[in-house]
């Protein structure tokens, strides 16, 4: 019987080593997948940012202060900002994927900039006010919105 116990212990030890090897391999595969997904997400955001800067001529790094200064965050939820976000206007996340701006303009950088500067000149019935933002500042805001995650 002693020989059988030794064989069972040996088989158990081998099974345990195989199990540990499988578990370790699965952990490494999961880690590799997470790193790959993270890199792809970062790469996509970097490309989206470059494209937004090229398309608008704006600087997205200046936009967060402008979005607060001109009160945009009082009416809109703005992606990436630590501001309370309003719910009077639409959520601005994903604006780059939308076909229209405010339901009336084809979504392109020039139209978005025009809308940000003077919404009533495009749609007199809009609730969005003229804030006093300049066209150059609106370019920065447009670059930010197009480069934000989901933009």
Image (spheres, rainbow, N blue to C red):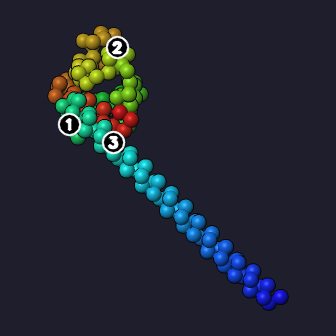
Which residue corresponds to the image point at 23% horizontal and 21% vertical from the top-left? 110
* Among the 4 quarters of the image, the one containing residue 32: bottom left
Which residue corresponds to the image point at 49% horizontal and 62% vertical from the top-left? 28
Measured in 3D between alpha carbons, the distance from the residue under mark 3 to the one under mark 1, in whole angstroms, is 15 Å
Q: Residues within 10 Å of mark 3 (few under 14, many from 20)?
A: some
Q: Is residue 20 left or right of residue 71?
A: right
Which residue corresponds to the image point at 20% horizontal and 26% vertical from the top-left? 133
Tags 1 and 2 touching, CB below 8 Å: no
Q: Say which of marks 3 and 1 sits in front.
A: 3
The location of residue 109, given as percent across then percent down, is 25, 24
Looking at the image, tell me whether mark 2 or mark 3 is earlier in sequence order.
3
Measured in 3D between alpha carbons, the distance from the residue under mark 2 to the one under mark 3, in whole angstroms, is 28 Å
Measured in 3D between alpha carbons, the distance from the residue under mark 1 to the one under mark 2, in whole angstroms, is 26 Å
Q: Which residue is mark 1?
A: 59
Tags 3 and 1 touching, CB below 8 Å: no
Which residue corresponds to the image point at 75% horizontal and 80% vertical from the top-left? 8
Q: Which residue is mark 3?
A: 45
The location of residue 117, given as percent across then percent down, is 22, 21
Q: Say which of marks 2 and 3 sits in front.
A: 3
Residue 93 or residue 99, whichever sits in front: 99
Looking at the image, tell me whether mark 3 or mark 1 is earlier in sequence order.
3
Q: In which quadrant will I find the C terminus?
A: top left
The local secondary structure at tag 2 comes to: loop
Q: Is residue 27 left or right of residue 96?
A: right
Q: Is residue 76 visible?
A: no
The location of residue 34, given as percent across then percent down, is 45, 54
The local secondary structure at tag 3 comes to: helix
Q: Which residue is mark 2?
A: 104
Looking at the image, tell me whether mark 1 or mark 2 is earlier in sequence order.
1
The circle on residue 46 is none
Q: Is residue 21 visible?
A: yes
């Amino acid at each position: 019987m002693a020989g059988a116990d030794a064989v069972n212990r040996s088989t158990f030890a081998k099974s345990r080593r195989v199990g540990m090897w499988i578990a370790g391999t699965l952990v490494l595969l999961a880690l590799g997948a997470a790193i790959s997904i993270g890199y792809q997400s970062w790469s996509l955001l970097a490309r989206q940012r470059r494209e937004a800067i090229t398309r608008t001529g704006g600087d997205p790094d200046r936009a967060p202060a402008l979005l607060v200064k001109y009160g945009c965050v009082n009416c809109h939820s703005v992606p990436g900002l630590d501001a309370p976000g309003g719910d009077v206007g639409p959520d601005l996340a994903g604006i780059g994927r939308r076909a229209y701006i405010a339901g009336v303009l084809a979504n392109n950088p020039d139209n978005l900039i025009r809308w940000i500067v003077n919404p009533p000149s495009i749609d007199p019935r809009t609730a969005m006010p003229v804030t006093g933002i300049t066209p150059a500042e609106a370019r920065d805001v447009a670059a930010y919105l197009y480069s934000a995650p989901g933009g």
